[in-house]
Amino acid sequence: MRKKERFEFVLNYFATNQPVAETELLYKDPYQLIVAVILSAQCTDKRVNMITPDFFIRFPEAESLAAASADEVYGYIKSCSYPNSKTRNLIGMAHKLQSAFGGIVPDDVKELMKLPGVGRKTANVIASVIYHKPALAVDTHVFRVSNRIGLTTNAKTPLETEKQLLKYIPEHQVAIAHHWLILHGRYICVARKPKCNICLLTPVCKFHNKKK
């Protein structure tokens, strides 16, 4: 099967069976989403969603977060992974957001990456989810699923994966494709024991057909 045909099958499947797909992080505005995505690194969305309600009551915008002490921020996020580094990143992000962007979360990936704690993946999430730009964030789920199905070939890094995927995903589907692949990796094509028995992508999946 040619790669183009594989992409068409996968995208048509998701478009038909999962026309609505979005982040499972809870947020109300761009500031809240950028905080949630920073917290979600190496941490489950479920855990982040347990942390953020109280966090946002105390720090409802960048200004209040920028003025906070590290000890106070740490106290709110200590149950997530890497709380020390995330505390530094959150306060640094808030400071930069205030000083460089007037408290407004930018819509450009390169500008977003100037914020502490915001790498390319996080920047792509913000650009696509908030500003509906054709940016594709590659996390561990997207990386794994793309490789297993055969959407990517010998991609060694998230950036390589992103570039290969963008060659075949139509621009109008890029933002939602990010969520399709994440959710598929989170609930079906899981890391240790992929649920091939209930997966409807098996006809075109290289991983599944290799096992036969």
Image: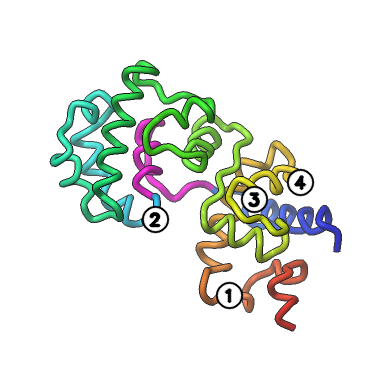
- Reading the chain from its start, which is encountered first: label 2 or label 3? 2
Q: Which mark is residue 161?
A: 3
State if disc 3 and disc 4 touch (CB < 8 Å). Answer: no
Circle 1 is placed at which residue position?
195
Residue range corresponding to the magenta coloring: 22-40
- Reading the chain from its start, which is encountered first: label 1 or label 3? 3
Circle 2 is placed at which residue position?
42
Disc 1 to disc 4, C-alpha distance: 26 Å
Q: Secondary structure at mark 3?
A: helix
Above or below 1: residue 158: above
Q: Secondary structure at mark 2?
A: loop
Can you tell which of label 1 and label 3 is closer to the viewer? 3
Q: Is residue 38 visible?
A: yes
Residue 101 image point, x, y percent: 39, 18
Q: Is residue 129 left or right of residue 152?
A: left
Q: Secondary structure at mark 4?
A: loop
- Reading the chain from its start, which is encountered first: label 1 or label 2? 2
Q: Residues within 10 Å of mark 4 (few under 14, many from 20)?
A: some
Residue 31 image point, x, y percent: 36, 31
Please identify the quadrant where the N terminus is shown: bottom right
- Asked if residue 54 is among those painted magenta in the image, a careful observer would answer no
Residue at x-position 35% and y-position 16%: 102
Residue 127 image point, x, y percent: 53, 33
